[in-house]
């Protein structure tokens, strides 16, 4: 049974999420602000964290940054602000998804299931131990490590998943719909702008090797080394 940590300073929001989450079979712990969330995460492990952005004591972005220092737990950010900057900032800090308030509890639960399936499913699979190299770029799939000229490149969990999928399908034209389906684990609720935002972040992380991610106008993207 998957464990969720719901972090929001609004009691009503926590109760709504708890109600739907428990109906779906999850167990739920609650935190009222970022500081409490960090304290709980230091002591306990969760399968996913639902984190509000605007909270007293410590906001969700700051809490996400701190939690990422010692946990790789998937995080879904909640915010009343849907500007692209806020979404990009959340993804840069390591969040796995971003949901704008007011939200549909049913949609949120579908996103929760998709993220847990994607991240938790991989833990139970035996990953093939192989390494892809291209000039100074090295991708260790089993260790989930990317290096450029021997220096490790830090990426968000979703960046790793997206990049690994593209590298494993090197040379193939990958449509936006295919990438969203394979990397995020859902189709109907996928947002192409979310994919494009992650591609921008991924290119930024890759530096000179950003050239390997080629945009296919009107189609999607392709990873190539030619």
Image (cartoon, rainbow, N blue to C red):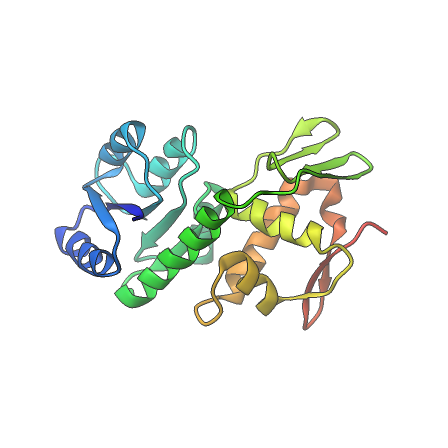
What's the residue at 57%, 48% (across, down)? 161
Q: With 124 as the anchor, is 65 left or right in this view?
A: left
Q: Position of residue 61 (x, y in %)?
A: 37, 41
Q: Nearer the viewer, residue 129 or 180?
A: 129
Q: Position of residue 89 (x, y in %)?
A: 46, 46
In which quadrant of the rendered view does residue 18 lie? bottom left
Q: Position of residue 9 (x, y in %)?
A: 18, 46
Q: Nearer the viewer, residue 126 or 6?
A: 126
Could you tell me if residue 67 is visible in this image?
Answer: yes
Q: How many marks?
A: 0
Q: Position of residue 104 (x, y in %)?
A: 28, 67
Q: Identify whether 139 is placed above or below 180.
A: above
Q: With 28 as the anchor, is 71 left or right in this view?
A: right
Q: Nearer the viewer, residue 44 or 204?
A: 44
Could you tell me if residue 82 is visible in this image?
Answer: no
Q: Identify whether 63 is placed above or below 179.
A: above
Q: With 99 as the anchor, is 134 left or right in this view?
A: right
What's the residue at 49%, 66% (across, down)? 191
Q: Identify whether 218 is placed above or below 147.
A: below
């Amino acid at each position: 049974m998957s464990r969720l940590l719901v972090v929001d300073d609004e009691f009503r929001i926590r109760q709504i999420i708890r109600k739907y989450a428990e109906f779906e079979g999850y167990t739920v712990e609650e935190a009222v602000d970022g500081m409490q969330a960090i304290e709980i995460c230091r002591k306990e492990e969760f399968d996913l964290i639902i984190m509000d952005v605007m909270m007293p004591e410590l906001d969700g972005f700051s809490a996400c940054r701190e939690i990422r220092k010692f946990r790789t737990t998937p995080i879904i950010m909640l915010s009343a602000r849907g500007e692209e900057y806020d979404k990009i900032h959340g993804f840069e800090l390591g969040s796995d998804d971003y949901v704008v308030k007011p939200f549909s509890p049913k949609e949120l639960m579908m996103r929760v299931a998709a993220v847990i399936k994607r991240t938790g499913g991989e833990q139970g699979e035996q990953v093939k131990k192989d390494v892809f190299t291209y000039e100074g770029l090295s991708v260790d799939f089993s260790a989930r490590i990317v290096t450029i000229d021997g220096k490790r490149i830090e990426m968000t969990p979703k960046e790793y998943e997206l990049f690994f999928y593209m590298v494993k399908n090197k040379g193939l034209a990958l449509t936006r719909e295919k990438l969203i389906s394979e990397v995020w684990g859902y189709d109907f609720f996928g947002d192409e702008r979310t994919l494009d935002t992650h591609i921008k972040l991924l290119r930024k992380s890759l530096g000179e090797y950003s050239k390997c991610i080629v945009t296919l106008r009107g189609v999607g993207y392709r990873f190539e080394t030619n």
